[in-house]
Image: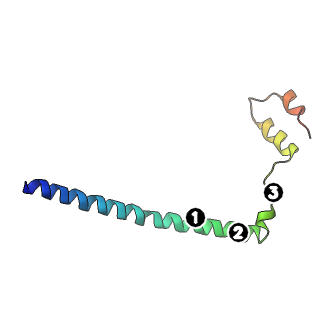
Amino acid sequence: MISDNYDSFIHLINDFLVRKRLKIMRWPQLSTWREVRNSIWIFLGENYELMTWRLTPTEVQRVLGLRIDFKAEAIATLKS
């Protein structure tokens, strides 16, 4: 009976330490992500929300031209 309690106690402590370790291991990842995000905001400036992320038809044609699963004729029929 005592060994069962001892094993349960050891498992409880081990689980607790593993969870704490995983949380601590994420700190550098979160810090790196925050630095990247801040760098992007600095690069884009104050009007970063006004930027459009859409591709122009010419850019779409150029990207599709790099792929082998699209025929040149089909790409040429896209609006430009």
In this rendering, the answer to whether 40 lies above or below 73 is below
Location of residue 22 by image quarter = bottom left
Report the front residue among 67 and 47: 47
Which residue position is annotated with label 3?
52
Q: Amino acid at mark 2?
A: Trp
Mark 2 or mark 3, earlier in chain = 2
* Element type at mark 1: helix
Residue 33 in picture, x, y percent from top left: 57, 64
Mark 2 or mark 1, earlier in chain = 1
Which residue position is annotated with label 1?
33
User: Marks 3 and 2: in contact by CB < 8 Å?
Assistant: no
Residue count near mark 3 (Cα–Cα under 10 Å), binned few <14, some 14–19, many ≥20: few
* Element type at mark 3: loop
Between the C-alphas of marks 3 and 1, the distance is: 23 Å
Residue count near mark 2 (Cα–Cα under 10 Å), binned few <14, some 14–19, many ≥20: some
Q: Amino acid at mark 1?
A: Trp
In this rendering, the answer to whether 55 lies above or below 43 is above
- Between circles 2 and 3, the one closer to the viewer is 3
Which residue position is annotated with label 2?
41
Q: Amino acid at mark 3?
A: Thr
Looking at the rendering, in which quadrant would you find the C terminus?
top right
Q: Residue furthest left?
A: 1
Location of residue 51 by image quarter = bottom right
Residue 3 in picture, x, y percent from top left: 9, 55
Residue under the image location 47 percent in, 67 percent down: 27
* Element type at mark 2: helix
